[in-house]
Amino acid sequence: MRLIIHIDGGSRGNPGPAAAGVAITTQEQRTPVYQGGIHLGRMTNNAAEYHALLHALKLAQQFGATQINLYSDSQLLVRQINGQYRVKAAALQGLHSQAKEYLTTFSDWRCTHIRREQNHRADELANLALDAGEDVIEVTPDAGTLNTSKLPDSSRPSEVQFMVNFKEASAKDCPAPTVANKQFACGPQIPAGLCIYAAKTALDLMKPNDPNLEVDTQCIHCGTTLSLHFSRS
């Protein structure tokens, strides 16, 4: 199954409050299967673009897609994903690596740059989430159209424990929202309010049936580099 995916990410201020927009349709009927705006917290425009991509890739994988066509109005993101540009910004390197890892799970993928006016729906969804200050999901997948058996249930975060070792500790608290403290059993290894966002981002890489995951990542907010180990309880 091939899915057509439009993505957009942006922030009001750079960095500032940010959101992603993702619009997914089937190739055959061009039927909308997912349309959502995802509130991201505070980050840069380029980081928001990458988070839009990661959210879209995760959904496509969970929906059972084997082939995808990606469309974005971010020339930087498209050229970096296609290997035309190097990823020079340290804050984007981890996100780029995560995206490339997801892409290896598809038998065929294409990432195409389009003009902003051709990406209207994804842009609109991102702005809806920014205005609302929370996720805005307008179209959810139809179990009769897509394979939704891989979608994690709402209890998934509480089923996963993680440990974090700081490779390069930050001298200041991470400015990222700390609401994730309510979703994950952080344990004593993680100072309160520090780099919780980086841990949450890395957790998104963990597939539903993986018993564990080890990954290095970097917090896009404060720059701390972390080595994370996740295990399913």
Image (cartoon, helix red, strand yellow):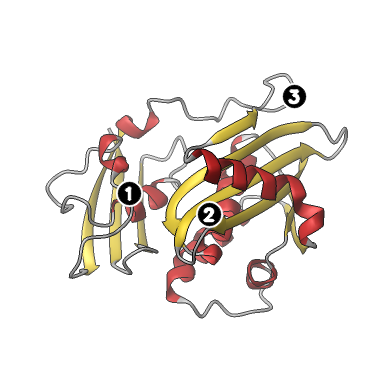
Along the line of sight, the residue nearer the viewer: 192 or 59: 192
Secondary structure, mark 2, is: helix
Q: Amino acid at mark 3?
A: Thr
* Residue pictured at 65% horizontal, 30% vertical: 138
* Residue pictured at 28% horizontal, 57% vertical: 195
Asked whether, in this view, residue 80 is left or right of residue 188, the answer is right
* Residue pictured at 61% horizontal, 47% vertical: 127
Along the line of sight, the residue nearer the viewer: 156 or 197: 197
- In the rendered image, the quadrant that contains the C terminus is top left
Query: Which residue has dot 2 on it?
Result: 51
Q: Residues within 10 Å of mark 1 (few under 14, many from 20)?
A: some
Query: Which residue has dot 3 on it?
Result: 145
Secondary structure, mark 3, is: loop
With respect to residue 135, does 230 lie above or below? Answer: below
Percent x, y of residue 180: 31, 42
The tag on residue 38 is: none
Q: Residue 70 appears in which quarter of the rendering?
A: bottom right
Residue sticking out furthest to the left = 188
Q: Nearer the viewer, mark 1 or mark 2?
A: 1
Mark 3 vs mark 1, CA separation in Å:
36 Å
With respect to residue 64, does 116 lie above or below? Answer: below
Residue sticking out furthest to the right = 29
- In the rendered image, the quadrant that contains the N terminus is top right
Query: Which residue has dot 1 on it?
Result: 177
Percent x, y of residue 179: 31, 41
Q: Nearer the viewer, mark 2 or mark 3?
A: 2
